[in-house]
Image: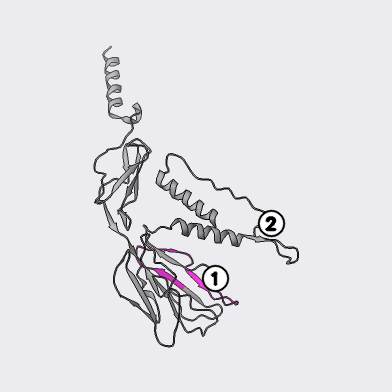
Amino acid sequence: MQSVLFGSLFFLVILNHCPFLNGAVSCPNNNLSIKDGSFTLSKSYNDGSVLRYVCPVGFYPHPVKKRQCKYGQWDPEPTSKRECRKVTCPNPRGMENGVVIPTRKIYYVNDTTKYRCNSDYTFRGSATRECQANGKWSGGTPICSRNTDHCPDPGTPPGASRKGNIFNIDDKVTYTCDKNLKLIGSKVRVCQDGGLWSGKEPECYADFTYDTPGEVAEAFGSSLKTTVTMYEESAGQAGKQIRLDKGGKLDIYVALDASDSIEEADFDKAKDIIKKLIKR
């Protein structure tokens, strides 16, 4: 009898101290706030809930953007100081054969830079650029070149350094991003016979850098345009991947994830992207 009673009490203690067995799985609601910002919860403090930090425009959450409640603990654990930091743009000091005005170690949102080439060099790109709230510079990469080689100077994007300054057929250029920046695009590009560079122009982004709905719609539309080529018998050329008869139509369906793991704000951003794409 005593052993049965002891076993019952022991099991009761386990239930009271182990939320995974009694179904009351939740995470602590303290030590979560972020300086100069706020946070949202997808499922309150329950298991599976996603905590997302929200900062004012021009700021980003540090050290992490989000946490998830897993088995009664936040992942990652909120141990270090949480704060909203100012967004910065990659440093454009890598520009060759020209000058950047003003020269600074750090460029913040709304900072403006102007570009000028050395004598005997021709300027291409944007002469004035502004650091935007998404961590990108407005306009296109400024380039100073002499146009004496087979391929034009491919330039050096902000936050990067380039190896290779000869641009004849089969010559290569290699890009490396500054510390804490990730390279998006082609690390190595080759000058081709037709005078064009292989791959895609590289960019260096921070973890907090993001694309605006307009940029996403533009990129998706451009990708679709290169994928779908109108078929005309007289041309003798079919589409690269999708073949359409002349005058034909193509229906495109876009599915959005509406599950509980998706924040309402993120869902609204996705809808905004689709609307901009349709208008294109």
Q: Is residue 33 left or right of residue 66?
A: left
Q: Residues within 10 Å of mark 1 (few under 14, many from 20)?
A: some
Residue drawn at point x = 31 percent, y = 39 percent: 73
Q: Quadrant of residue 197?
A: bottom right
Q: Is residue 159 visible?
A: no
The residue that mark 2 highlights is 244
Q: Residues within 10 Å of mark 2 (few under 14, many from 20)?
A: some
Q: Is residue 243 left or right of residue 159?
A: right
Nearer-the-camera pick, 190 or 273: 273
Where does the magenta region start and end? 174-196
User: Which residue lies most toward the right here?
Assistant: 234
Q: Is residue 58 left or right of residue 175?
A: left
Q: Quadrant of residue 119?
A: bottom left
The residue that mark 1 highlights is 198
Residue 228 x, y percent position in the rendering: 63, 59
User: Which residue lies most toward the top here?
Assistant: 1
Q: What element does badge 1 sit on?
A: loop
Q: Quadrant of residue 234?
A: bottom right
The quarter of the picture where the N terminus appears is top left
Nearer-the-camera pick, 148 or 165: 148
Give the mark toward the camera: 2 or 1.
2
Residue 195 in magenta stretch? yes
Residue drawn at point x = 61 percent, y = 60 percent: 227
